Image (cartoon, rainbow, N blue to C red):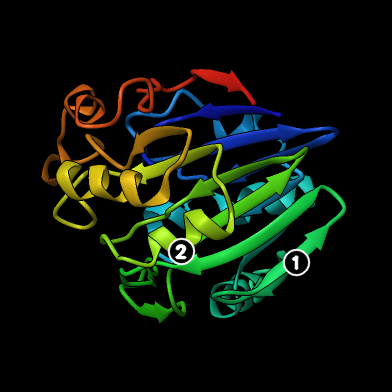
Amino acid sequence: MKISYHGHSVVKIVTGETTILIDPFINGNPLTDLKEENEKPDVILVSHGHNDHVGDTVSLAKRNDSLVIANFETSTFLGWQGVKTHGMHIGGAYQFDFGKVKLTQAFHGSSYETEDKQMIYCGMPAGILFMAEGKTVYHAGDTALFSDMKLIGERHPIDIAFLPIGDNFTMGPEDAAYAAKLLGAKTVVPIHYNTFPPIKQDPHSFVEMLEEGQGKVMEPGDSLEL
């Protein structure tokens, strides 16, 4: 399994013949190294409905006939736009041919703002557990710290966790460091920082708060093998 980070909350997973994009906010993302027209995901996972996480899901999915997986409300909204979807909800898991996906709770909001300034309700925000090739990836989405992260880590031993550190809208570095302790993930990567002024953070300072060897700062385009 190859995993790469692409700025803000964008994560790419390649497992077997399948390419998966999580929260593909590409156009309008000043930190990403990706070009939307070059990406060919087979699957898109969306943590919640905010524009900086739905991102380019519709155009990517339509062009590549991608399967979009999200909570029921978000998947319904995207399905109305002609996208192939699989709706799920918090606590539910589903075994796909490319791996298993399970949604966890996340404490945040979830709505999509249209070009004409309408707010579309997109259900509860989620974290995402992805399991394949004997490995478990946890993408926390946008969330505050919550104590049940300990249960998530106990029930699903995590090889790599992507945790937001931007503060203001999500956990800040201190809370994210405590989340890393609760989760017990082998590797922790900070996400959702420095994209906009209110979420400016130093990811290296965050990593210094973690257990030795646990934290890893990934620059946009960096990848690792699990």
| Residue located beneath label 1 in the image | 94
Picture coordinates of residue 121, whole percent (x, y): 42, 81
Decide: few, some or many residues near mark 2? Use Cα within 10 Å; few <14, some 14-19, many ≥20.
few
Q: Is residue 80 above or below residue 51?
A: below
Q: Is residue 3 left or right of residue 132?
A: left
| Residue 23 seen in the current view | no
* Secondary structure beneath label 1: strand
Q: Residue at x 41, y 50 (%)?
A: 183
Picture coordinates of residue 111, whole percent (x, y): 38, 73
Which of the pair 213/96 is nearer the observer?
Answer: 213
Picture coordinates of residue 57, whole percent (x, y): 58, 53
The amino acid type, in three-letter code, at marker 2 is Leu
Picture coordinates of residue 89, whole percent (x, y): 59, 77
Q: Residue at x 36, y 44 (%)?
A: 163
Decide: few, some or many residues near mark 1? Use Cα within 10 Å; few <14, some 14-19, many ≥20.
few
Which of the pair 17/210 is nearer the observer?
Answer: 210
Q: Dividing the picture into quarters, in which one does residue 184 lie?
A: top left
Q: Residue at x 83, y 32 (%)?
A: 16
Q: Earlier in the sequence, mark 2 or mark 1?
A: 1
Q: Is residue 125 left or right of residue 204?
A: right
Per the rendering, the mark at residue 174 is none
Quadrant of image for the C terminus: top right
Q: Residue at x 73, y 69 (%)?
A: 86
Per the rendering, the mark at residue 151 is 2
Quadrant of image for the N terminus: top right
Which of the pair 130/65 is nearer the observer?
Answer: 130
> Which numbered disc, 2 or 1, marks the residue closer to the eye?
2
Outermost residue toward the front in this view: 154
Which of the pair 122/117 is nearer the observer?
Answer: 122
